Image (cartoon, helix red, strand yellow):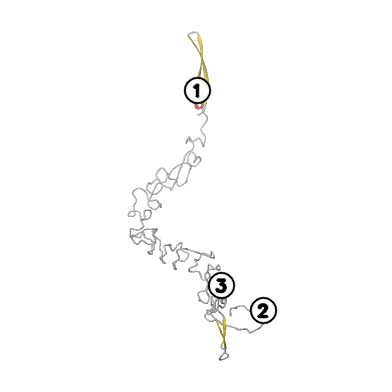
Amino acid sequence: MNRASSWRVLLLGGVLLSLLFLLPDSALAQGPPFCGDGICGPGENGVNCPEDCAVCGNGVLEPGEECDDGNIAPGDGCSATCTLEAFCGDSICGPGETNLNCPEDCAVCGDGTLDAGEECDDGNILNFDGCTPSCQTDSDLDGIADVTDNCPSTPHPGQQDGDADGVGDACDNCPTTVNSNQFDSDSDGFGDDCDCDPGDATVWGTPGEVPALVLTHNLGTGVTTLTWVPPVPLGGTTVRYDTLRSFSPGDFGLLAAVCV
C-alpha cells in the first residue's frame, strides 16, 4: 500500500524535534466509490456493476465465479458459492465415489463388471484374450484394440502399413498402392486400384518373368521340347503363354506381359 508522509514539529524540553509519520493514502484522501473498486457500494448491483456485485445463482457467470448454474443448491457440480464441486459424472473418481455408486467415473477394468466407458470386461487385465488391459475389444486377439487396430479382423501386431493408407499390410488388398476404400469390384481379393482388370475375377495383374526356361532336343526322336516353371506372381487363375521363334536376339525384348 502506498503511504504518504506527514511531518510534525514539536518543542520538547527546549529541543526542537521533527518527527516523520507514515500514513496510508486512505487516511489522507478517500475518493468516492466506483464500479471496479472491488466493493459493492451504494447503487451498485449485479446488473449495473457485476465486477463488484456478482450474484451467485443468477445463471450469469460473473467475475469471481467459477460457475453459475442458476441456483445455489449444492451437489450439482456448482456450489452455493459458485465454485466448482465434484459430482458423479464429472469423469473424476472423487472422494466417496466407487465403481459401485458411481461407475461413470470409477470404472475398474478387470473386475468382471461392464462399467460405463468399457467395451468389455472379462475379469482380468491380460492381453491377447479378446479384451485388452484397458477393457477395449480386440477381435483378432493380436493385442491391439479394434478402435486403433489398422487390421481389426486380421492379426497384425506389428501394424505395418507400407503404403500409409490407414489399412495394415496384413489386410490391405493393395498393400503397395494407396486405396483406403478397399474397393474390390470383382471380389478377387485384389483392390480395384491395383487390379489390371477390376471386372474380371480371373485376372488381377500381369504375370512375372518365366523362370527356368529349358529347351531339350531328343536326338533319337528328333523332338524338341520347351519347358518352364510358371511365373511368380501368376497374375490370374490361368496364364496364356505365347512363343516366338527367331534367330535375332533383339526380337525377344519386344514383348512384355499384358493383362488380358
User: What amino acid is labelled 2 in the image?
Assistant: Gly
Residue 239 as seen in the image, left or right of residue 154: right
User: What amino acid is labelled 1 in the image?
Assistant: Leu
Instruction: Give the answer, above or below, for where 38 lies relative to 198.
Output: above
Q: CA distance from mark 2 to mark 1?
A: 111 Å
- The numbered mark at residue 180 is none
Q: Which residue is mark 3?
A: 194
Please report whichever mark, 2 or 1, sits nearer to the chain's N-terminal start: 1
- The numbered mark at residue 250 is 2
Work out whether residue 140 or residue 114 is closer to the camera in this orientation and state it. Answer: 140
Most extreme residue toward the top is 14
Point out residue 200 in the picture as x, y percentages from the top left corner.
54, 79
User: What amino acid is labelled 3 in the image?
Assistant: Cys
Point out residue 111 in the picture as x, y percentages from the top left corner.
33, 58
Please report whichever mark, 3 or 2, sits nearer to the chain's N-terminal start: 3
Q: Does the CB distance between marks 1 and 3 fall below 8 Å?
A: no
